[in-house]
Image (cartoon, rainbow, N blue to C red):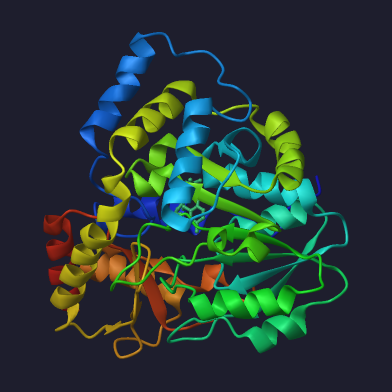
Amino acid sequence: PSSKLPSVGLTIFSQMTALANQQKAINLSQGFPDFDGPKPLLDAVGRFIAEGKNQYAPMAGLPELCQAVSDKVFRCYGRKLEAESEVTITSGATEAIFAAISATVNAGDEVIVFDPAYDSYEPAVTLNGGTTVHIPLLPPQFAIDFQRLQDAITLRTRMIIFNSPHNPTGSVMSSEDLLQLEQLLEGTNILLLSDEVYEHIIFDNQVHQSFNRSPMLAERSFIVSSFGKTYHVTGWKVGYCVAPEALMKEFRKVHQYLTFSTSTPMQAAIAEYMQSDAEHDQNLPVFYQQKRDLMNERLSSSRFGIMPSPGTYFQLLDYTAISDLSDQEFVLWLLKEAGVATIPLSPFYKDGTQTGMVRLCFAKSSDTLEKAAEQLCRI
Ligand code: PMP
Ligand code: GLN
């Protein structure tokens, strides 16, 4: 049978985690913490299940969670949202991304993405008959080149997908970037999808430039986040989307038939926890910066080049002083020689660009990070 996604295989994250498990290596590949979320949050799920919160949640999400999201967005970014009409709780950010694209991208439309790009954007566009137009982010900063962006815009451009803090490079957008984007979009009706799942994981006293901060951008944006990243519970698969009412109406038409609604006890627990501990988000930068700095300090005597990582829990390492293997070959070699699993960068590029870099995830206990660094310093 013909395939609707002929070039898609098992994701590189699943592949590398399977290899890491098989070879009993330290798994710094797929992005997930090796520690649990806050205990009151975990306990609340069991309590809500015991109390009978086990049937369908409302299609758009539990009202108390939509309200908690709306309060958070106001507290962090000063944007006032209508919890009933402008917030939808989804099965992870992945569902939100798919629903936003499906709700708006038509056959023949172009969607601009920046390479290296997170893997779920392109298949969603393709399945809806659109095509992705790829613009490179150039090392070492992996910043957006607005001239190239402007040059890529055509009459068919329906949407541009942004991701800050950025997976896999860790780069972050600046307030100047937001201003440039505002200017570029003036007079167009191009939509935006802003993937902000790492919104609270940003370092060195920088401020996350959420699209929620700009009324001009927000009025044409689907802004997506993930409780998995913020509360160290990636396996719960709960996220959300915020958008103006007219866009959200279309988004919900897809969400309603994609999943209908999101796990009730998880939503109840997250809502309760968000109301009881607003500090959690604010402590994440320091929490993860310590991990980044520990890892990088321990790697400073290695032969890897340590790239800047101003956000996310990912770090790029340049291995060109060690090997001239392709990145796909290098991660296999590294797994065998150092017992550490990482992610090659080329799968994040449409054309498989070789950068001589691999990505590691530092959302791990200090013990794991120290052990991994020691093994990486040996090669
Ligand atoms: N976007 C980016 C940039 C991510 O890194 C991830 C997590 N891998 C997602 C979206 C998906 O988030 P979720 O696990 O909540 O579906
Ligand atoms: N977002 C995670 C990462 O970048 C992986 C998610 C997944 O496995 N699909 O590693």
Report the front residue among 338 and 282: 282
Q: In the visual, does 355 lie left or right of 2?
A: left
Quadrant in the picture for residue 301:
bottom left
Q: Quadrant of residue 321?
A: bottom left
With respect to residue 208, does 304 lie above or below? below
| Residue 250: percent from left, percent from top | 77, 41
Say which of 288 and 118 sits in front: 288
User: Looking at the image, which residue is at 45% across and 36% down?
Assistant: 68
Please report the residue visible at 34 percent of the width from the left and 81 percent of the height from the top: 307
Q: Nearer the viewer, residue 358 or 74?
A: 74
Q: Position of residue 162 (x, y in %)?
A: 59, 66
26 and 150: which one is in front? 150
The quadrant the N terminus occupies is top right
Q: Position of residue 26 (x, y in %)?
A: 23, 57
Would residue 330 appear left or right of 106 to someone viewing this image? left
On-image quarter of the C terminus: bottom left
Which residue is pictured at 81% across the width and 70% down the height? 188
Q: Is residue 335 above or below residue 97?
A: below
Measuring from the top left, give residue 146's x and y in whole percent: 64, 84
| Residue 344 appears in the figure | yes
Query: Can residue 4 be seen from the camera position used here?
Result: no
Residue 241 versus residue 295 in the image, above or below? above
* Image position of 155 (left or right of 180): right
So how many labels did they put on this image?
0
> Looking at the image, which residue is at 80% across and 59% down?
130
